[in-house]
Amino acid sequence: DFFEVTFPATAPMFSKIRWGTVMKTISLADWRRRVAELYTDIRRAEDPETAWTLWRDTRNALFCEHEQSPISKDRRAEYGAIPLFDYDPEMRFEVDLEVPESDAVLAGEIGNDGHISLRPAARTRGLASKLGAELTVYWIEGYGGGTFLPFTDATSGSETYGGGRYLLDSIKSADLGQTPDGRLILDFNFAYHPSCYHSPDWVCPLAPPENRLPEAVRAGERMG
């Protein structure tokens, strides 16, 4: 799990820079592996609140200790914990999916990660009675693809980040799974801020206007 590399005094500076890039890549792979394992454990948990507690504690450790944390190194030692609303069982939904209202692809630039295209894949059915509207689930175009569900709500800009929060991003393993009969699990207790909220070093896709919920979702990550 640990190794140490020592450069000879004559090693050219570019070698050190290249090695730094290698280590950063290894660190990022480790971050993604740990997040993937976390969501696997979440889907296997005995009950939703136990899963949420695991999510909370694991993410706190990653944010405070991991090299790839979106929290800057000079803030990690004193960061403490990610601010969260209390767990609310009423914020967990099992929804059906319908054909989306629009097939217009959303596209934009996301910094060093290049270009992103989001294709509407489905529209939820089962949120409106509680949250006032349904949401569009997007498919991230490109190699492998992945489901993506960003949203804003009545807390956005006051209690939570104005640009919205994410609930699903299967490219990064944020996937709560499905019920045995095929309904999509949307538990807003697992909603989280994109990395750009925590650091200006990141550029993230924000929630589109059509994915705004008129009701307040006081569950998941909040502003400190």
Image: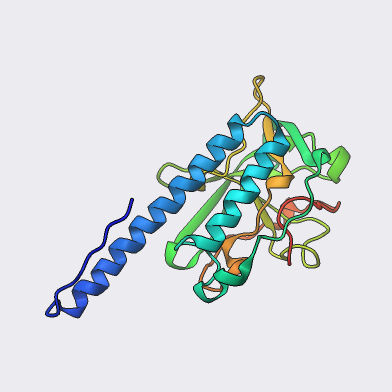
Residue at 64% over, 64% down: 80
Q: Is residue 30 left or right of residue 133?
A: left
Percent x, y of residue 135: 73, 44
Image: 25 above or below 53: below
Image: 126 above or below 80: above
The C terminus lies in which quarter of the figure?
bottom right
Residue 188 seen: yes
All told, the count of numbered labels is: 0
| Colour setting | rainbow
Residue 167 seen: no
Instruction: List the single residue furthest toward the top.
Output: 181
Residue at 53% over, 65% down: 70
Q: Nearer the viewer, residue 25 or 3?
A: 3
Percent x, y of residue 59: 58, 53
Q: Is residue 30 left or right of residue 213?
A: left
Instruction: List the single residue furthest toward the left.
Output: 10
Percent x, y of residue 198: 60, 68
Task: Examine the image and state in which quarter residue 49 appears.
Answer: top right
Percent x, y of residue 105: 57, 50
Q: Nearer the viewer, residue 18 or 101?
A: 18
